[in-house]
Amino acid sequence: MVMAPSAIAIDHQETTILNDNKVDYLDTNNNHGVESDVTGFASKALIRKVLQEHIDRVNVDTCEPGEEDAFYVADLGEVYRQHLRWKLNLGRVKPFYAVKCNPDREVLRLLAKLGTGFDCASRAEIDMVLSLGVAPNRIIYAQPCKTKSYLRHARKVGVTQMTFDNTDELRKIKECYPDAELVLRILTDDSTSLCRLSAKYGASLLDAKELLALAKELGLNIVGVSFHVGSGASDPNSFGQAVKDARYVFDEAAELGYDLKMLDVGGGFVDETFEMFAGNLNEAIEEHFPPHVRVIGEPGRYYTSNAFTLAANVIARREVISEEEGEKAYMLYLNDGVYGNFSNIIFDHQHPVPQILSAPENKERLVEYSIWGPTCDGIDIIADRYFLPGVINIGDWLFFENMGAYTKCSATKFNGYNDDHEVIYISSEPGASALLGY
């Protein structure tokens, strides 16, 4: 198991920043006072500096409406490093990035330049990827239950690879796209995953044989098998059984005259356990599948979660009685919440960690806070109890790391709030900057 080496310590001449389609450059000879201590991960200190420089330009007492809105800093160098790490640890598995996780155009553009494939689940996602000049054969339509008109659109634009898991879908494909290359999605045990998918998708091994027979009868072309151990998987052994089950389906298909050529191992990869999962997956693949079988995966959060940092402004504060006798506590209200970029709290079971960006008063002592979003809904809470140093005031800023997965993409306009917040792009990797033309 190999961790990706640092492609740089931030000591090259320029780190690129792209903001509102205008490219600026940070002189990093002195790194704006930031230590050059990168060892394979984006410089948190540099990100912090960019956050600070942005908020320094905002005066909440005089700014125009919306100028103090929440915003992101995205280090595309981190996406680049995660790709190197994938190639080092899962060299046989070609990544097909799960667009739904974060369809940020700069992320997609970088991954397209790196040669990844793309897991798309709708017409809009397919069109977004194709608009970057990506060939249709680098897309898998990984949605087992597809809209008819979207199927016809996939046929029109040449996206041939797609998943299915039931008899009705096979008949629909026969009607709308009989030349498609089909991948049978099978059921897996995802009981230890953050977001379980097996209740909605996947054919049992018993049903798989019936589906293979029906596909043969309909004259459809099955090319492979897919599975998904669940988003944010926590059991590294889950891949082993899933790969073994896929081998069983390959053998059943062979008995019916099919010669399957592709295994899709889905997603579930997370940053913290990646090497462990990769090792177990590699062992299972080598045991059950010969080298001529093409293997792809569908990583999402693995690529983008750590690359995005969100900053939000404190728009209101309310003093309350602390659970600790005699101590003051505060309710803080931010200009972003669970109906916005913190939608990952509800949809992705995340627990974003608040950190102070602007300096508070009396920071030598810890103060108890609850942190809320701006809407009128009582469920709009980011943290129900958290201790931070010092007294935070209205107009101060908090920031949250690891906000690049299932956040901005699922934000809403509830209560009239903005769902399209500014992203400041930085690249701490010369390789990423060169590919993107920054």
Image (tube, rainbow, N blue to C red):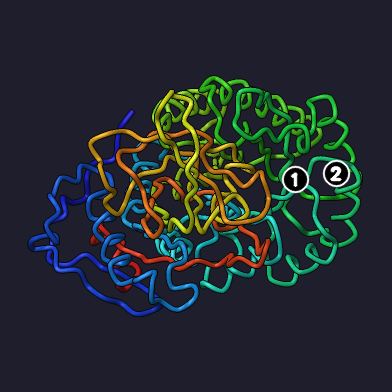
Quarter of the image with the N terminus in it: top left
Q: Secondary structure at mark 2?
A: helix
* Residue type at tag 1: Ile
Classify residue 167 by image quadrant.
top right
**In the image, farthest residue toward the front:** 326
* Dot label at residue 156: none
x, y percentage for residue 13? 12, 66
Q: Quadrant of the C terminus?
A: bottom left
Which residue is under mark 1?
222
Q: Are marks 1 and 2 in contact (CB under 8 Å)?
A: yes
Vertical placement of 24 versus 263: above or below? below
Q: Is residue 184 visible in the rendered structure shown here?
A: yes
Tell me which amino acid carries mark 2: Ala
Residue 215 is tagged as 2
Q: Quadrant of residue 329?
A: top left
Q: Is residue 397 left or right of residue 117?
A: left
